[in-house]
């Protein structure tokens, strides 16, 4: 199959066609079970911290989008899973060399053939996106969906890095909070509530 045929079949067959490339959510849960997980957000404030060694010590390190690595001291270098909600250059994916590529966005038209054909590709269910949208009252960020996904697994420990809920803006772009459709106050409250009843989850600031 080539990119043109993939795009045509995606338009004609929709979700069922894309699902045929995806591993099952149960496989992700199996991979996460009993592991120490680091979910690395793209807050600019992370650049001023020294969490890199702790990030790289995690069993599975999950990053997002272009996953900018400002320095090994602040960000580490390890990337086991890479979560996307927008296309990123193939060069970036090759440099990060993730074992899994996760498509988290509801918008399927942005799913490229070069993503779906990768071993370990995962397509996050639309129903899960809709559930988070309903709970937050706004479109969820990739970060909060990842946190929810991992928290629903039997991971042993979940460390969050680079999440300040847009206080310092994002390394992934130049937009401010008024220019994006997310509710960062709602996402902060979601994570705070999660940490209140799930002691596996730690927000490292």
Image (tube, helix red, strand yellow):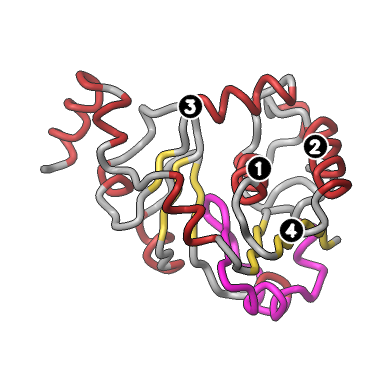
Residues at circles 2 and 1 in contact by the CB criterion of under 8 Å = yes
Residue 112: % across, % down: 31, 40
Which residue shows up at 29% across the image and 57% down it? 119
Question: Is residue 166 toward the left or the right of residue 127 in the image?
Answer: right
193 vs 96, nearest the viewer:
193
Q: Which residue is mark 3?
A: 126
What is the C-alpha distance between the residues marked 3 and 4? Answer: 24 Å
- Residues drawn in magenta: 45-73
Q: Is residue 61 magenta?
A: yes
Q: How many C-alpha atoms fall within 10 Å of the one at disc 4: few (<14), some, or many (≥20)?
A: many
Residue 143 lies in the magenta stretch: no
Work out whether mark 1 precedes mark 4 in sequence or the reverse, and give the earlier one: 1
* Residue hosting label 1: 148
52 lies left or right of 203? left
State which tag comes first along the sequence, 2 or 1. 1
| Circle 4: element type | strand
- Cα distance between the residues tagged 2 and 4: 13 Å
Image location of residue 20, percent across then percent down: 25, 38
Vertical side of 137 occupied by 84: above or below: below
Separation of marks 3 and 1 at Cα, in angstroms? 14 Å
Number of on-image labels: 4
Closer to the chain start, of discs 2 and 3, is 3
Residue 190, label in figure = 2
Circle 3 Cα neighbour tier, 10 Å, few/some/many (<14 / 14–19 / ≥20) = some
């Amino acid at each position: 199959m080539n990119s043109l045929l993939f795009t045509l079949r995606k338009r004609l067959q929709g979700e069922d066609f894309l699902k045929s490339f995806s591993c099952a959510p149960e496989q992700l849960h199996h991979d996460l079970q009993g592991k120490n997980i680091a979910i690395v957000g793209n807050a600019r404030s992370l650049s001023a911290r020294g969490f890199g060694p702790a990030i790289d010590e995690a069993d599975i390190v999950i990053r997002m989008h272009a996953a900018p690595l400002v320095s090994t001291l602040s960000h580490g270098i390890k990337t086991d899973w890479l979560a996307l909600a927008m296309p990123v250059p193939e060069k970036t994916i090759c440099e990060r060399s993730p074992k899994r590529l996760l498509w988290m966005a509801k918008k399927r038209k942005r799913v490229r053939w070069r993503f779906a054909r990768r071993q370990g590709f995962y397509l996050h269910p639309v129903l899960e996106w809709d559930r988070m949208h309903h709970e937050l009252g706004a479109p969820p960020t990739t970060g909060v969906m990842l946190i929810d996904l991992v928290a629903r697994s039997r991971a042993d420990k979940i460390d969050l890095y680079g999440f300040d809920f847009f206080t310092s803006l994002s390394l992934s772009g130049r937009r401010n909070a008024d220019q994006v459709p997310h509710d960062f106050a709602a996402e902060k409250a979601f994570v705070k509530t999660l940490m209140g009843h799930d002691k596996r989850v730690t927000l490292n600031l």
